[in-house]
Amino acid sequence: MNYESIDFEMDDWESGEDEVIYESEEFREQNSPIEQHPEPLISDELPVLPLRGVVVYPMMWLPLPIGQERSLRLVEDTLPSNRIIALVTSKDEEIDEPAPDEVYRIGTAAQVHRVLKTPDGTMRLLVQGLERIRLLEFTQEKPYLRARIEIMPESIEEGLEMEALMRAVQELFRRLIELEPQMPDELTIMSINVDDARQLAYLVASSMRLKIEDAQAILEMDRVRDKLLRLIQLLKKEIEVLELGRKIQSEAQGEMERMQREFFLREQMRAIQKELGEEDEQTADIRELEERIAAAGMSEEAEREALHELARMRRMPIQAAEYSVIKTYLDLLVSLPWRNATVDNLDINHARKVLDEDHYGLTEIKERILEFLAVRKLRAERRRNRKEEPEDLRDKIRREREGLVLCFVGPPGVGKTSLGLSIARAMNRKFVRLALGGVRDEADIRGFRRTYIGAMPGRIIQSLRRVESRNPVFMLDEVDKLGRDFRGDPSSALLEVLDPEQNREFRDHYLDVAFDLSQVLFITTANVLDTIPPALRDRMEIIQLSSYTEEEKVNIAKGYLVPRQIKENGLRPSEVKFTDDALREIIQGYTREAGVRNLERQIGKVCRKIAAGVAAGEIKRGRTIKAKDVATYLGKRRYFDEEIDERLENPGVAIGLVWTEAGGDITFFEATRMPGAKGYVLTGQLGDVMKESAQAALSYVRSRAESLGIDPDFFTHSDIHLHIPEGAIPKDGPSAGITMATALASLLTNRPVRPKLGMTGEITLRGKVLPVGGVKEKVLAAARYGLDTVILPRRNDSDLDELPEVVRKQMKFILVDTVDEVLAAALLSSEEARAVNDGQRAIAQIGDDSHKVRRRQPRDVRPSVVM
């Protein structure tokens, strides 16, 4: 193979300033075949030139730049002799002067044909690979490497398989050259004209971009057949990579061409529209937005921001991604109700009429709402007359709060949300409701900044945009169920929303301009207050809604629920009627709740069954639902009166009044004793506070053992077990103290607790009874379950004023200061206890139903109980 066939770009390899130090006869006679010159003799020991990042193959011509001192010394010492050197590749390209163990042992013996010296002192060699060699032993390391070598000729097979492999390599190499623009087309002709399989393998390998490991592996293979097979694998992989890259470039080029084509078409369309006197899409958008901005009546800051964004939009091509972002922002900005507001109707008589139409009872709640509206009415009148007032007072009125934020707190189903709707109807305002249950992201309140993809305003701004009014009644439902996690604290974001001093300039992150929320009437609802942060609770006026009594539920059903369900189920009032007894049967036997939500469901269920009969032609005339007919439509009773039997007849059982998120309830406290040694077991999933109350109750009973007629050493030889049933429900709180003390005293004195008696109150070790909360809910629960006597702390006397008159009349309240008074009122006397123990049951048998207590059967799963 001659030098000319390699087709080196000599202009790139040498410059006019290079000095030619040596040229071989073969190089000077470039047009003469190499075969005409005698084959150089390769000695057994050669100088070794380590190469970095390149592998030299036999039969190949290659230019090599060198600059290290030992490499320059090697060339200077070699030129006078036969100019044969050993070329090996370094294992690590980062090492400047690799040691003998840092180079591959198999390389190529090469002959130096030309040496150029550059002005910077380095040299450029033109070498020709001769034979494959192996380094046997290094004989010299300084000033350069020398080693004994042995020649390793390749094994060349012949036959059809080798011819097929050569053609496969030639075809793949041709496809590679077509895909790789840096490779000259002459290489295709060279590969086709090569008849030697070994020469073809080395030509292709030296022309490809191979990793050093792959290039060295091809050199080290002994069989030419293996070299060709490996090259076929590498060629296929490289072709796949290049084809994929070309496909990606083609798609990108096609997209660019499509965009350019669309751009030119739009420009042409714009020119045509201009000639016809028509507006293009961008001009039309900008003109429309200009008109909407002028008519929106937004604040000065908002208008300034809108005009700024509109100017950016005018300078931006319509194809830009930012164009649609700005357009969406401006659409939202101009669609907000900056000026739109409804005129308040502050007629107190009209508001009272609306509240009475929508809700039964709730007298105190209605009065508080009317007071709230009256204050707003007076403030509105003062603002109209403020020109007659001094300047400082006008400023004070201007800064005055529009009114407190109302917070309705109560069990589910008592009408909290519907009260907000009634207020909106009474004031002639629009109503919007936002459910906050489970909201954990602050951005749901304040919105996302426009820097985020898919950003949007918060729910407050979105709701105002939908309702199209700047002064609606805005109900924030379930404010006690707001969450909190790594995305922020939405309850903290509400602090600004619900403070009239701050929400005059509420800034949503998406809008980034101030929006006045001071005219919005915010109303919040909650089931409990404990989970509402104190700072947020301080911004609201709490209005408690209590459970309904049975009589109230009957009236609500007659006046509201039954007519609504008759209408919703397509019936006429003449087709179905409910008697009062039927409604009481539904309330007592099929619902146990503080509100009326489940009651309405049961009434709706009856109405649906009647509607099905009317539609099928089975019911021809009106149907009156009586108490005995309820089971026909609703099935067997879920709750029913059950005799207390042994539980209250036996010592150690007392009834406690409890409070839950769903309203008040009752529960039994059961105590028993057994032989043991000072064991005190508490079960029923009790909280820490309740466990402490149980321990205090036991300590008090032990301290009063002698006065109660109990063996003072009873605890020495006894174990006591105190259990509160329904162990799956968590229970906590201090107000079960007197109930636990009564159960323990009843057990140890062998005196049962009086039937139909419930109690609640916290105790101290001195025997004092402290006040508790939730008295109204607890007493209403006692009334629902048929109890007629309730023991309460004396300091809770004022809470009885909140009870409905019908409950106060039908129940007996015993107010106590000490546990001794509790035990005296709750426990049967010794004679009564003996009568019960002897089977006479004098008190229990006064009437057939005198010792019955209605309780859940089966008991529904309830939320956590607070004693």
Image: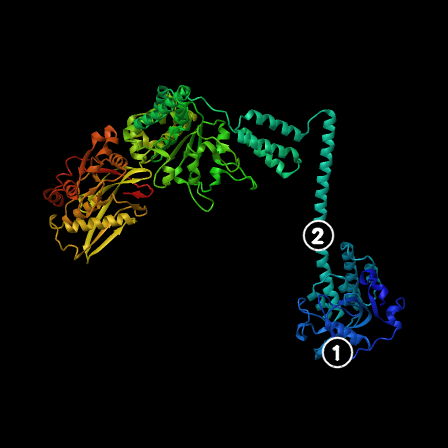
Residue nearest the observer in this picture, 389 or 403: 389
Label 2: which secondary element: helix
Q: Which mark is residue 150?
A: 1
Residue beneath the point at 19% across and 58% down: 677
Label 1: which secondary element: strand
Question: The N terminus lies in which quarter of the figure?
Answer: bottom right
Estimate how packed mark 2 is, as few (under 14), some (14 to 19) or many (20 or more) residues with alpha carbons within 10 Å: few
Residue nearest the observer in this picture, 612 or 327: 327
> In the rendering, at what x and y percent does residue 694 appear?
23, 49
Residue nearest the observer in this picture, 191 or 474: 474
> In the rendering, at what x and y percent does residue 686 appear?
29, 48
Q: Which mark is residue 302?
A: none
Residue 45 visible from this viewpoint: yes
- Cβ atoms at labels 2 and 1 below 8 Å apart: no
> In the rendering, at what x and y percent does residue 134 appear?
73, 76
Q: What's under tag 2, amino acid-wise? A: Gly
Q: What's under tag 1, amino acid-wise? A: Glu
> Of callouts 2 and 1, which one flags the residue occurring earlier in the amino acid sequence?
1
Looking at the image, residue 608 lies above or below residue 69 = above
Question: The C terminus lies in which quarter of the figure?
Answer: top left
Residue beneath the point at 47% across and 34% down: 506
Q: Which residue is mark 2?
A: 245
